[in-house]
Image: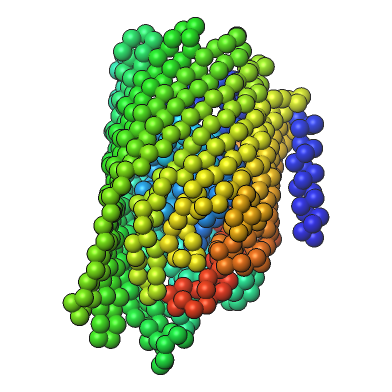
Amino acid sequence: MKKTTIAGLIGLLFSSPIFAAETNIKAKDVIVTANRVHEKIQNIPANIQVISPEDIQEINATSIPQILSQLGGFNVTGTALGQFNQGATIDIGGYGATSGSTTLVLINGQRVSPIDSSATPWEIIPVQSIDRIEVIKGSAGVQYGDRAVGGVINIVTNESQKSINQASATIGSFGTTGMNAIFQNKLNDTLFRISGNANHSDGWRQNTSSDQYSINARITQSFEKSSAYLEVFGNHNKNQTPGAVVAPIGQGSPRDVKCDIYSCFKGANNIYDNYGLGLGATYDLASNINFEVDLSHKNTMTKFNQPWGTNYNAPSFSGSADYTPYNSKYNRWRTDASPRLKINLEKLGILVIGYDFAHSYGSVNGSDYFPSYKYTTTSNATLTDNSVYFNHQLPLQENLALISGFRRQLQQIVANDGWLDSDGFSSSNNAKKTTSANAWELGLNYKFSDAEKVYIKYGQSFRFPNIDEFWGYSGFNRTFFGGLINPQIDRTAEIGSTFEIGNTKVTTSVFQTRTEDSIRYNVGTQKNINDANLVERKGIYLSTASFITDRLSFYTNSKLQEAIYEDGQNKGKSFDLVPKLLINARVNYKFDNDWSLGLVTNYVGSQYYDGANDKSAYTKMPSYIVSDLYLNKKINQWDFRLAIKNLSNERYSTYGGYQDKNNPSFYAGYYYYPSDPRSVFASLSYNF
């Protein structure tokens, strides 16, 4: 049955361009900010996908990871996704467990990606306020620097409409409820927007209750030659954590909380508070020179509480089970400044010059409580980044342009680590280091028409270690200083095109990336390392968009990829958590302007568990197919939306790993985090 379904998907994928009437987004009308300035999409040598607000509304999206999965076909993974896709990471470049650190996420060009290895706080961005989502499928290291290795996701909020006033309520399976509201109005040259969300879910698994609260406000003032904005946001989350199912995927009791001879997650929870502000301005210094600047500060606090904690008398010890409580407090903040100039050199093209500054800090305090003993760890690090860059688009002929750019980034690292126990024993470590990395790019872009292009480029990008990657994770939940880490370097060659067959839009690209000093967590040593072995990533993207009739539209996104070790003891073996094949297909039918029905299907191929190469555990995570059905009805100012998720009730997992059996603070053997079964959701919105 599954083979038949896959064959059908592939058939649809490659046959879709031959029947079409007209695409709903014309390339000549799309302005994006991939080069950190507004530019027509066909002028940029990159595979850029633009997701429109109309498509977002069609699928009844409740989270941005859902949008990226169902409309972009990207691989979404996580350990506690639930109904809100909490803690989701998006893998664009085939980086597996480190994809969260190699995919850069922005809001209106400002960084949202955290300074550590945690997931992007997607919930701070109200879905209703999104004007479009721009996704660069490939590196953009010159434009954005650190983390822009596998791809970039830029979420652009709506600044053009005079009024967006909407309130909505959602109810669904597993005790899920949601209340969302957005109010946006424009008075003369001043735009005001405020939005808020309150969501709750009991969760399908035991101990997976989740609560989300967020608020966002923005004011934009336009002047004759300039504009300025101020934005503030905050969100509070409390999520219970059930732990993994200790078994290969498909086995064990997927709903049960993990509680065994190693550790117990009964009552375990994370409390997450995130708030910040951003401000910026644009000013026309001359008719051909535009100045832009963005400033931001973000603060995040996470508290983890595990009442039952780790079994002190694990199998390597004697005696009965004795679970010790554990809690930790993790604070981090980041301040950014990013001024830049866009200069129109007329016949010599467009030149962008910029400077990026970032200062960040993170500290974690953890405590183990034993019957007559207390052990406390304290770790902190400070990162200071300074970066300069330029990007130049030089026209060689009427439709041919040479693209070049360069970035130099310096990072100063100060790290401290220590522990203290109740007997008065203590230890401390500290280290300092300054590292640097360069990004560069050279490419050609040729436009066949206002909607078609072909490009070729070669470049280098990098990622610096996250603020929490200087520490390992040893027995009994304790952290230890693992040493300073060098930047990861990636060199990518890419060729791609956008063209039309009939009236169907087809976008494709082929890439090859070689990664040196790959930053990853080593399961064997339990710390983060620079991998001494080279990794080669290569693949092909293919996307199509077509209207079969005026009412029936069909879209596909697919990726064939592999990530292989080039040398070392794992030579020829695949990188962990990288499926070779991803297929996304979506069909939408409009009965009239008020009724629509749609179906979206995602196929994710088999892949190795996290830690497979470190522990020679080569059982594969099984492939899976998930389909969602959605129905939309509009009655005057009311919008009713119904969604059935996981229509076939597929039993699957987006993340699994392997760990030693002799470490009591981790999992014994294979483990995985099960995804939710079939669920039903209904929402009702009122537009003022």
Q: Residue at x 52, y 40 (%)?
A: 490
For this orientation, the residue located farthest to the front is: 568
For this orientation, the residue located farthest to the bottom is: 319
Q: Position of residue 62 (x, y in %)?
A: 50, 49
Can see residue 301? Answer: yes
Total marks in image: 0
Instruction: Report which quarter residue 503 is drawn in.
Output: top right
Please give left or right for residue 669 compared with residue 436 in the image: right
Can see residue 334? Answer: no
Q: Nearer the viewer, residue 424 or 251?
A: 424
Q: Residue at x 64, y 63 (%)?
A: 621
Q: Nearer the viewer, residue 336 or 551?
A: 336
Q: How is the image coloured?
A: rainbow
The N terminus appears in which quarter of the rendering?
Answer: bottom right
Instruction: Report which quarter residue 388 is drawn in.
Output: top left
Q: Position of residue 593 (x, y in %)?
A: 62, 34
Q: Is residue 17 above or below residue 319?
A: above
The C terminus appears in which quarter of the rendering?
Answer: top left
Q: Is residue 271 above or below residue 122?
A: below
Please give left or right for residue 164 compared with residue 45 in the image: left
Q: Residue at x 26, y 57 (%)?
A: 430
Q: Position of residue 256 (x, y in %)?
A: 52, 76
Q: Position of residue 11 (x, y in %)?
A: 80, 44
Q: Residue at x 28, y 54 (%)?
A: 431
For this orientation, the residue located farthest to the top is: 347
Q: Nearer the viewer, residue 425 or 75?
A: 425
Q: Nearer the viewer, residue 105 or 459?
A: 459
Please give left or right for residue 494 compared with residue 336 in the image: right
